[in-house]
Amino acid sequence: MTISELNERFAMPGALEFDEHDGLPRVQVRLASAEATVYLHGAHVTHWQPAGAKPVLFLSERSEFADGKPIRGGVPICFPWFGARSDGHEGPPHGFARLQEWELAFAALLPGESGDRMHLTFTLGPSELSRSLGFDEFRVVYEVMVGSTLTLRLTVANLSGKSLRFEEALHTYFAVGDVRETELTGLESARYLDKPDGMKEKTAPGEALRFTGETDRVFMTNVAPTMIDDTVNRRRILVEKTHSATTVVWNPWNEVAAKLRDIADDAWPGFLCVETANANGDAITLEPGATHAMTASIQISPGSDIV
């Protein structure tokens, strides 16, 4: 669908319009309560900014915006696997969902007590790429609800006659003033796999998580909400979730960041990934005809000193 066709079908004057960046169509949402940008490529939320706040999501200035390439930053969708594919078959890192153009199926402006919300629904079905990777009988629906809270719901349906096993993640990059001055609470004393240390299973300390080096931790069987204490920006970001048993926390630090061509060498202190997921031992198995919905809800914590 062209930009003009999208605008003709879905645009709402002053609230919702479509344009493109480097040839990729995107949705621009502007409300009194918040603004946001979502690309059809990957159904990728790259920007969310509540009224009176600084942007909450980090987007790399070196990110590639091109067919077949993932966008670096914002909220990439990882599906149907997380990280490297582990079933013995080949496939792109984090699956194919973030590399595909999704279809916008629904858009509506909904009134609310804390201001208007924009409800967007994107869908993804089998494609030439997914079929080449062995996935040809599924449907994914992604709901993006933009307002003073950003709510993201990923629903997977198994349309096949056999069970479907998959991993999933909303790989959210949060913008922080300096990750070295940031704390994360909600994961105290939780078990995790430490990727930089050979996936050894460890237990987190019984205090806020602080960042002093490369961090890539997969917190297992963990449904707790988390709070990012961004001291430099003088705000707290609350992340709540449902039907997600995995929380992933990641920052590459300087040495790993230097190897990533789509992140500037000096950009790593400006973000912290706290990911809502079902991965590794928490992978989902759906029986024929079944569905599974995972939700992440993000907001500036009440009482934060928003600047």
Image: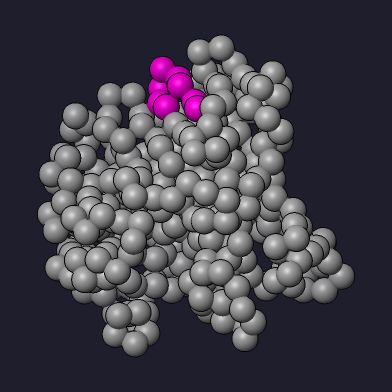
Residue 190: x and y, percent? Answer: 33, 73
At horizontal 59% and vertical 41% (from top left) the residue drawn is 40
Residue 5 sits above or below residue 274 on the image: above
State the residue in front, 287 or 70: 70
Residue 78 sits above or below residue 217 on the image: above
Residue 221: x and y, percent? Answer: 46, 72
Residue 182: x and y, percent? Answer: 18, 54
Q: How many marks?
A: 0
Answer whether residue 26 is magenta in the image: no
Main secondary structure along the magenta-highlighted residues: strand
Q: In the picture provided, is 157 more to the left or to the right than 247?
A: right
Q: In the picture provided, is 191 more to the left or to the right than 305?
A: right
Q: In the picture provided, is 139 more to the left or to the right than 254?
A: right
Examine the image and state in which quarter residue 131 appears: bottom right
Residue 204 sits above or below residue 243 on the image: below
At horizontal 43% and vertical 74% (from top left) the residue drawn is 220
Answer whether residue 33 is magenta in the image: yes
Examine the image and state in which quarter residue 288 appears: bottom right
- Magenta region, residue range: 28-35
At horizontal 39% and vertical 72% (from top left) the residue drawn is 218
State the residue in front, 6 or 248: 6
Residue 128 sits above or below residue 152 on the image: below
Residue 249: x and y, percent? Answer: 34, 64
Asked whether residue 44 appears in the rendered view, the answer is yes
Furthest residue to the top?
Answer: 13
